[in-house]
Structures are given as C-alpha cells and as structure tokens.
Image: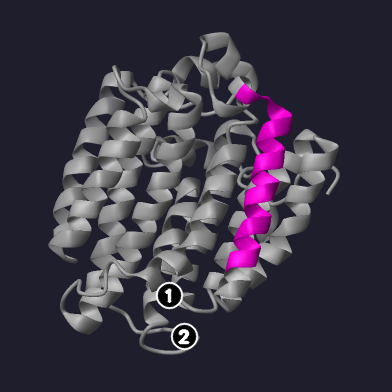
Amino acid sequence: MIKNFLKNHPVHKRIVPSLDSFFLIRPTLFFSVWVMVAIGMYSAEMNFKEFPVWILEFSWGTFFLFIGLTLICASTFILNQIEDLESDKINQKLFLVGNYIDINKSISISKVLAVLGFIVSFFSNYLSALLILFIFLIWGIFYNKKPYNWKDKPMLGWISNSCIGILLYFVGWLHINSNHLGSISTFFNLNMILFMLPYIICFSSVSLLTTLPDIKGDKKVGTKTFPIAYGINVTLLLSLGMIIIAFLLAMKNKDPLGSTSIIVSLPFFIYSTFRHHDKDILRSIRYPIFILNFFTLTIYPLLFIPVVCFFYLSKYYYWHRFNLHYPTLLVEND
C-alpha cells in the first residue's frame, strides 16, 4: 500500500518540480566524492589505531568539511552540465539545464554554491578550505571552461579526474591528522602515498570508464575523450590493468578495506573488458562505487545517513519527474 502510494500517486508529479534546483547539483555523484574523503580519513586513522572500525563520534569540524566540499563539488557539477549541454542532449541524459532551469539561473546557483562552500569549509580548517579551492579550480574551471576545456582532451580529462581523487583523499587525510596532531607534520610522507595509491588508481580507472557511455554524443560535438582518441579496447584493457595493480598494492599494504573492495569488484572489470557489452561497462562503473561505499560504512557508519537519503530521494525524484529508474544497481538482464 505504501509502496503503491510512493510510486503511483499523482500528487508526486506536483511535488517533484520543486526539487529541480536541488537535483541540478547531481546528488548521486557524491557517492564517489564522499567515499574518497572517508578513505583519506580512514588511512590517517591507521596511523593512530590499527584497523579502525565503527567510528561513531560526531564532529562539527567533519560536518563542516563535508558540507563545504559538497557545495563546492555541486557548483562544479552544474558548470559541467552547462558546458556539456549539447552532448548530453544527444546522449539523452541530464535534462534540467536549458529545459527546466534557465542557463543564467544555473550559473547563478553555481556561483552561490561555490562561495558558500568555500566559506563553510573554513569552519573545518583553512588548509582543507585551500584544498577544496583547488578542487573547484580543476573540476570547475580548468575541466570545463575555455580556453582550458580539459574535459575535451583525452589525457587531460583523465588526469584532471585522477587529480581530484588525490585531492579528495588529501582532504580526509589532512582533516584527521590536523585533529590528532594539531599540525600537518605528517601530511606528506611515504606511508600516505603508498596507502593512497590503490584507491587513486581505482578512482582513476572508474573515471576512465565513465567516458564510455557518452561516446556517441561526444563524437557528434567534437569532444575527443580518451576512448574516442585511443579506442574502446585500449580503454577497457587499461582500466582492468589498473584495477589489478591496485589490488596488488592494497595486498602489499595489508589494507583490508582496499584489498577486499577491489577483489569483489574485479569480476565486473573482467566482464566489461572481454565482453564489451554496454551493461557490463555500466556494472563496472556502478558496482565498484557501491561496493567501496558498502565496506567504508563499516568504518564510518554515519556516512550511511546521507548516502541512503540521497539514494532514495533521487529514486523518488527521477521516477516521478522523468519516469526513470535511477539511481539503480540493476542493469539490463541482472
């Protein structure tokens, strides 16, 4: 009865238009943003407590850090939608900008979110705010805006996304170290880099795969992404090779979170590499993000609250607004 009401009652068609501005920020993308910060925090915690799990302490500093980062990233996601308007139309995705929300209004929202995000992040600490500013510069300006347009260049687009993964990890690492030590004396050290590598390689690998579903639209508008420049086979093989290397490094680090998450995700990369089916590529993008979040929740269970809220609110919105089952872990023939 409740399920039928939530899915079919006509009142929801009148409610969801009021959520358009919120969903302009693409909330489902935060599943990969938040988890990288949490992993940076977990990696730093390993310096103070062996194999930390079930950390339930609430911290205002951590709260402001995540809010500030979320607002900044939301601003960059809006800018990306504006710049990708034509290719997204061809790929039949991201319907809000230009259709339901005016482009000028979208730009204004992006600017407000960027300013608010930078201010809020200062309530955590100024060094985190500085790193978050770098995230905005790379993902918001260099990635999207002319004359840079890194997203339209095969190597720079991939490298910029990989750099974001590094910065997100650094944000979490710095946050924990500054809380424990009151300084960044251990911010840059060999342990951090070695522990970081498997996660960054995985983040980079999945980032590479996300360009595959958009090939049709990118080709028509002249965007030269990595798979367009080097081919789908090379992209898939490179992605699989990176995942294997990441697993070996995680095992060498004796990192239970990294090694377990990667080995569970590995079959999806193997299937996509050797079968080349669209459904396999989608699985190798969606499932590793879910799996990494799932295992990370055993360390920071409070992360469960925003992840679940964003997930089900998004399902509600996209179903009643566009008749789409999204987000979903189901892929064709699952």
Q: Hey, which quadrant is residue 272 in on the image?
A: top right
SS at mark 2? Answer: loop
SS at mark 1? Answer: helix
Q: Which residue is mark 1?
A: 42
> Going from the N terminus, do you reach mark 1 or mark 2 first?
1
- Judge from the rendering whether residue 290 lies leftward or rightward of residue 144; answer left or right: right
Instruction: Tell me the kind of residue under disc 1.
Output: Tyr
Q: Nearer the viewer, residue 47 or 141?
A: 47
Q: Residue at x 27, y 76 (%)?
A: 177
Q: Residue at x 24, y 42 (%)?
A: 113
Q: Which residues are magenta?
A: 230-249
- Judge from the rendering whether residue 62 lies leftward or rightward of residue 305; answer left or right: left
Residue 151 pos. (x, y %): 44, 27
Query: Looking at the picture, does residue 139 appear above or below residue 199?
Result: above
Residue 140 pos. (x, y %): 31, 34
Residue 156 pos. (x, y %): 43, 30
Q: Which residue is mark 2?
A: 52
Residue 66 pos. (x, y %): 31, 61
Q: Residue at x 30, y 54 (%)?
A: 69
Q: Residue at x 36, y 87 (%)?
A: 48
Q: Hey, which quadrant is residue 160 in on the image?
A: top left
Q: Nearer the viewer, residue 100 or 38?
A: 38
Q: CA distance from mark 1 to mark 2?
A: 7 Å
- Judge from the rendering whether residue 220 lies leftward or rightward of residue 180; answer left or right: right
As for residue 315 lying within the magenta part, the answer is no
Query: Looking at the picture, does residue 17 appear above or below residue 184?
Result: above
